[in-house]
Amino acid sequence: MRILWLKSDLLLPLDKGGKLRTWHLMRHLARRHEITYLAFAEPDTPASDVDGMREVAARVETIARSEPAKGTLRFYADAAMHVIDPLPYAVGKYRSRAFRQRVEALVAERPFDVIVCDFLFPAVNLPKRLPCPAVIFTHNVESEIWRRHAETKSRWLGRMLYGAQYRRMLRYEGRTLARFDGVLAVSDVDGQTFTRLYPGAVKQPVHVVQTGVDTDYFTPQSRNPQSRNPQSAIRNTHLVFTGSMDWLPNEDAMQFFCRDVLPLVRAEAPDTTLTIVGRAPTPAVKRLADDHAGVRVTGRVDDVRPFVRDAAVYVVPLRIGGGTRLKIFEAMAMGKAVVSTTVGAEGLPVVDGTHVVLADDPRGFADAILRLMRDPATRGALEASARALVLERYDWSAVAGQLEDALLRMARASASEVREGARLRASVGAGL
């Protein structure tokens, strides 16, 4: 197949869950198919990031775009300009005539078998008429994220602003899904949610492409001794969280955890510590280290594995989210005990008490952590079951096959329709 892949950013550096998912899937697809990748790029993007993309795409093109840093005056001015925009802010900021024109030029230059729109955001630049089927690869139900944002805000202004964005996203998401020949989701839960929210928009059953994990890279400490920090060892009272710390659901998760859960844990285990690992921590996240004893914020790191290996429990206290969390599968592949909210583990094929422990209220979450810290046998059984699950079913090579099958079916169906149309036109012409 010839695939045109559209995304709002380059995949390198691999510092976000969505980037990691796409990278691994494209890497497997690129072995048998020709991919052209079009994305926005910041003006100061290192050439190595563009060149590195050629590992997963035969052709890489970028459209220059500069996004203001969160919390800056330009950021707030940009957000204010979108207050009256009918598009949700998260989508409207990617609107680009240059991107749309480049898509039009690419599909005119050469025949593609299928177009993949990666996430909802690049779809705002998709031309109305396309010569081949187009598929949207949704990593989340975006409207659900905004709904949960609105529900977790304690102040009326926050509820009003996020509520307005939720309603705009709900309208935009439904209209956009209706434009595509196929919808890909990362879990059965997301697929069912799309069908429930937009029953007239989804033209055919949603194809599910499960979350995967690189089980050769994410390994237990004993399996990868060369990368072990000799100064470190698993500490029974150490917790860890990883993620992009400029993503609002992650920021909310850490604020909630440090404010409502960690004090309950430290009341019974005073030496408990938490390390928050991830790129671009917001000022609110950085303040957590100053405001709460035992909390450390690292910022961006080259390798999250040493931090995860050092911890007794990996925590995922998300209250807002959609899609599936790669971070949970990564921790499970490393043989780590995971305590998560229901939202945090949503869409993953895990069993509470067998692969992870689920808890939603602060007391229940704290009790689950304390139980695992105090009982190495229970923790060990959970860790073994978790790693066995991802090893058996969720290596990226198997998951990429699901995506390849879905794209091939759509491309072949489109080709069949073209041939049938030509046959009908020929038969009509012969009868004249």
Image (cartoon, rainbow, N blue to C red):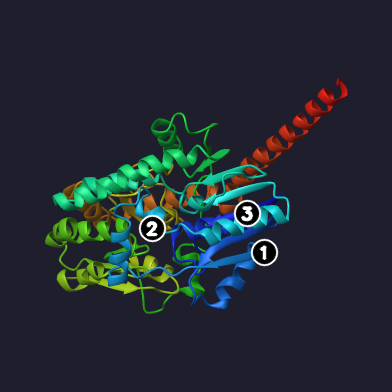
Above or below residue 285? Residue 109 is above
Left or right of 180, for residue 343: left
Mark 1: few, some, or many residues within 10 Å (few <14, many ≥20)?
Answer: some
Mark 3: few, some, or many residues within 10 Å (few <14, many ≥20)?
Answer: some
Label 3, secondary structure: give it.
helix
Q: Give how far across and how far down residue 109 sits, in percent.
A: 72, 56
User: Tag 3: residue type?
Assistant: Glu
How far is disc 3 from disc 2 in space, using C-alphas? 47 Å
User: Tag 2: residue type?
Assistant: Lys
Which circle's residue, 3 or 2, is located before the other in the chain? Answer: 3
Q: Circle 1 is placed at which residue position? A: 59
For residue 26, which quarter of the picture? Answer: bottom right
Determine contact: label 1, label 2, CB under 8 Å.
no
Q: Circle 2 is placed at which residue position? A: 336
Residue 150 visible from this viewpoint = yes
For residue 305, which quarter of the picture? Answer: bottom left
How far is disc 3 from disc 1 in space, using C-alphas? 16 Å
Which circle's residue, 3 or 1, is located before the other in the chain? Answer: 1
Pair 3/2: label in front: 3
Which circle's residue, 1 or 2, is located before the other in the chain? Answer: 1
Which residue does the image show at 24% across and 52% down from the upper left? Answer: 371
How far is disc 1 from disc 2 in space, using C-alphas? 38 Å
Residue at far left of view: 267
Residue at far right of view: 430
Q: Nearer the viewer, residue 124 or 37?
A: 124
Q: Give how far across and how far down residue 241 sits, in percent.
A: 32, 62
Q: Circle 3 is placed at which residue position? A: 104
Left or right of 291, for residue 299: right
Label ID, residue 352: none
Above or below residue 421? Residue 4 is below
Above or below residue 65? Residue 140 is above
